[in-house]
Image: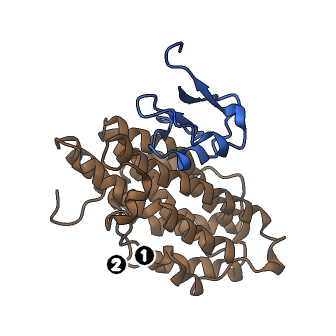
Chain colours: A brown, B blue
């Protein structure tokens, strides 16, 4: 018997995962992939709740700075442009017309991700930790991150199919949504809430974009295979680390 | 003199934020539209931002004595 979902995950399932405007093989495929994602989504949510509650007990600003620096490394201009460029470049010129709706959403997400980077920088600016965003270029924490190579250009070559990135949108952006919900439930700091509330709806749009791609485009075995391969990669046991920006903490740290 | 943003005209492009040497332009708190605000206590009134605004009425100079 499957374990019950974390309440935050169940709420997310009921509101955003289960309702669908389509029917057929794409939806069936998505729900099969959802069952694979759920253990990770539940674990990540539980860790985010724990991290938020631990942060709430801390005094001083250092925990906020850790979150903001990690968030900048995850969503700042370098990562945003690399990550989103790989999505746009996965569609060959001769297939642009077929996937023009997805390309438009991917272009929009570049703007979103850059704004999210700005928000993380703004936490540091408003807290007086930096004078200008340029200062972050000298920070290791703001530039180094331990997320998968999948989010950089390197893995583009392994996942070139125009639909492969649907797995990333669906699996990873759900973790962002769940992490934000979990953190907002625990943390009342105005700067952290500012950074998260300002981007919350866009993270959901990125997830829904994955849902749309799976429901509407992954209709045949040929279309599903490259997406499932991307899920296989993202769901490897060693692959999931949750960035401190969304509430995770390294083992052994606070 | 200081600068403020007129929401009716601002397109939230963020160029003023990039140009401001004081880092006085910030994303507005908890704004899902990502509009910006100039923190008056950080603005020195240098006006470096003004020539970069693509919608000039969006950046308004004001006199702090009469504001």
Q: Is residue A1 left or right of residue A79?
A: left
Residue A108's image quarter?
bottom right
Using the image as rendered, state which of residue B23 and residue B66 is in the foreground: B66
Q: Position of residue A183 (x, y in %)?
A: 35, 45
Residue A198 makes an appearance in the image: yes
- Residue A124 in the image: x percent, y percent? 35, 48
Q: Quadrant of the C terminus of chain A?
A: bottom left
Which quadrant, please, contains the N terminus of chain A? bottom left
Judge the density around disc 1: few (<14), some (14-19), many (≥20) Cα neighbours within 10 Å.
some
**A56 on left or right of B56:** left
Q: Name the one closer to the observer, A108 or A208.
A: A108
Badge 2 is on which residue?
A238
Local secondary structure at mark 1: loop
Mark 2 or mark 1, earlier in chain: 1
- Percent position (x, y) of residue A187? 30, 40
Query: Mark number for residue A148?
Result: 1
Residue at x 71%, y 52% (from the top left corner): A21
SS of the residue at dot 2?
A: loop
- Single out the residue that lies furthest toward the bottom: A158
- Residue A185 in the figure: left or right of residue B12: left
Q: Residue at x 32, y 53 (%)?
A: A67
Kindly identify the residue that appears in the image at 50 percent across and 41 percent down.
A198
Tell me what residue is drawn at x 19 percent, y 66 percent: A251
């Amino acid at each position: 018997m499957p374990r019950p979902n974390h309440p935050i995950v169940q709420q997310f399932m009921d509101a955003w995962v289960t309702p669908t405007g389509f029917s057929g093989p794409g939806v069936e495929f998505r729900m099969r992939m959802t069952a694979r994602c759920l253990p990770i989504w539940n674990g990540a949510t539980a860790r985010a709740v724990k991290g938020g509650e631990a942060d709430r007990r801390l005094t001083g600003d250092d925990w906020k700075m850790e979150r903001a620096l990690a968030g900048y490394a995850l969503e700042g201009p370098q990562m945003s442009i690399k990550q989103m460029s790989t999505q746009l470049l996965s569609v060959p010129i001769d297939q642009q017309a077929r996937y023009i709706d997805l390309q438009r959403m991917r272009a929009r997400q570049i703007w979103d991700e850059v704004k999210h980077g700005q928000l993380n920088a703004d936490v540091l600016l408003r807290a007086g930790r930096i004078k200008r965003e340029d200062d972050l270029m000298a920070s290791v924490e703001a530039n180094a991150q331990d997320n998968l190579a999948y989010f950089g250009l390197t893995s583009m070559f392994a996942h070139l199919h125009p639909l492969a990135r649907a797995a990333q949108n669906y699996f990873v952006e759900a973790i962002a949504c769940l992490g934000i919900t979990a953190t907002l439930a625990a943390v009342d700091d105005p700067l952290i809430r500012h950074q998260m509330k300002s981007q919350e709806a866009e993270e959901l749009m990125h997830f829904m974009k994955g849902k749309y791609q799976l429901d509407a485009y992954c209709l045949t075995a040929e279309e599903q295979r490259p997406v499932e391969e991307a899920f296989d990669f993202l769901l490897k046991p060693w692959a999931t680390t949750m960035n401190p920006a969304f509430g995770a903490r390294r083992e052994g740290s606070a | 003199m200081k600068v403020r943003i007129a929401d009716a005209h601002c397109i939230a492009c963020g160029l003023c934020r990039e140009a401001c040497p004081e880092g006085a332009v910030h994303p507005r708190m908890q704004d899902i539209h990502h509009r910006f605000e100039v923190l008056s206590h950080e603005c020195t009134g240098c006006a470096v931002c003004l020539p970069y605004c693509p919608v000039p009425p969006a950046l308004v100079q004001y006199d702090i004595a009469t504001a």
